[in-house]
Image: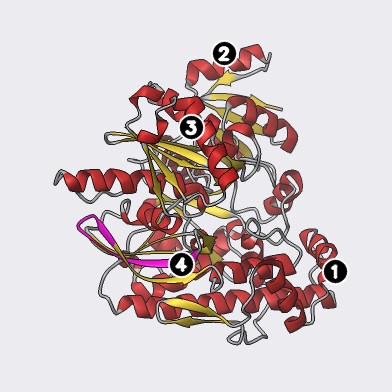
Amino acid sequence: MILGIHDGHDAGAVLIDGEKIFAVNEERLNRVKKYRGFPKLSVKKVLKMANASPEDVEIIAVAGIFRKLSRLRELEANLKGLFGRDFKRKVLFVEHHLAHSASAYYTSGWRDALAVSIDAAGDGLSSSVYVARDGEMVRIAQSTYVDSLGDFYASVTELLGFRPMRHEGKVMSLAAYGKPTYDLSAIIELNGLGFDNHLGVIGVEATRRLAEFFGYPLSRAGEIADQMKHGKLDDELQKKAIEIAASAQKHLEKLVEELGLELKGHSLPVAYAGGVAQNVKANAVLRGVLGDENLWVFPAMDDGGLAFGAAVFVKAQMERLDGRWRPSKLEHVYLGPAYGKEGVEEFLRSEEVEYEEVDVPSFVADALAEGKPVGFFQGAIEFGPRALGNRSILADPRDDGVKERLNITLKRDVFQPFAPSMLWERAKKYLEDLDGRPNEFMTMSYTASESFRGEAPAVVHVDGTTRPQAVRWEVNPTYYEIIKAFERKSDLGAVLNTSFNMHGEPIVCSPADALKTFKKAGLDVLVIEGFAVTR
């Protein structure tokens, strides 16, 4: 058994037992969003899921190189507490960007590929490019933490009053409301397969420099962001913020496109991870350069996927030593804790909750058709930042007004879009620029077809794009049947799918989390392992 650990922000653990993978991030268990620290609960949970003990772990793959003595001592104390005094014999450290790139390459299904990671920073670097052949990875390019594309975007995020390293998606969403008016080539540019930061500073210093560059009142950024959160987008400063967001997004897309053209020259498909890979609009641009069949974005692309990357890298190296390595494709990310029907019913009884057992597909489809948002909970929780039908809030995408209701109840920013889950076989009809295999993990944006824009306005952004999950029966039969049942009622093979959580909280993991959020959000219906709870 190989245990992957990420001790840092977005902490988590992954256990690989042969071909079985168990994975969960600490935030889902301790309910602290993007938790920073040692993933003690996650380690215990994945061991329990595998019916394993600490003694069964042969290798502990730790993502990241620990340079601060205090942090290293803290890590060692935690490992010793779990694995005993001889834990050091099992530990292998895997550098940050190698873990990111490995997570993408070893799940891509490709024997030969380019493995790319781009983020703010990790172990002194902000990007890496590897040539990966027959399971071996050789770095051919990199950028230092100073020349960071991720930090550039994070600084814009901070400048606009949002939380850097957390709310970059808000900047991407806001950008769709305006047009780029600033040329940012003097800020950061592509240099070969890396980047050049012309500011020469990062973090808060870069944010201050950008405030000067744009003439933006940094002291009022939080106030302006709060006004935009509640829908005020047309005053002078809000318009300026939107122009900055649009300019930053356009420049990011330009640099990613230029990088894609450089990568294309190597005549290999690209496996991609890292924090910047969360930007689905930039991913769409990269897809446009490389083609649908030549780009794979690892679903847990942010630092929450580092434990996975460390574990699969070490596994691959062990297999290479024995001549056993073969390419492997990740089919799904339902890798976390599951609670089972009996356990859920016992919980509902203990909470004295009124419930009834239902035929899930028809019951949920009826509720959606009646305009009732549904909290939906089944099986193992998803690994990664997206809810993909096991911990989701579902709604009718035909009703544009449902967006306002969900934004209010979940306390979301009103300018952020909602996404659809659609039947696999409907993807080509609903998406204009889909040329290959539909995306199953919500890692790409697409241009919605004219018919889909008209039929499903609640899941199409103001710029006509959408971030879909294509659902196959073979991967998630119950969720597929829900969408199919809704199609029979509405002639639309898609539902609105947003993550089952209040804004700023982690996605629900346990039945207790689900019931609490159901009540807090004032949802109409909770369907949990085949049981329906209504208000």
Sequence order check, earlier mark of 2 and 4: 4
In screen coordinates, is 248 left or right of 337?
Answer: right
- Residue hosting label 3: 79
Q: Earlier in the sequence, mark 1 or mark 3?
A: 3
Q: Which residue is mark 2?
A: 346
**Residue reaching furthest left?**
323
In the structure shown, which secondary structural element does the residue marked by tag 1 occupy? helix
Task: Give me the C-alpha separation between circle 2 and circle 3.
Answer: 34 Å
Query: What is the number of the mark on residue 127?
Result: 4
Closer to the observer: label 2 or label 1?
Answer: 1
Q: Residue at x 21, y 44 (%)?
A: 319
Along the line of sight, the residue nearer the viewer: 45 or 425: 45
Q: Residue 278 in magenta? A: no
Amino acid marked by disc 1: Ser
Q: Amino acid at mark 2?
A: Glu
Q: Can residue 9 be seen at all in this image of the molecule? A: no
Q: Which stretch is magenta?
A: 125-137
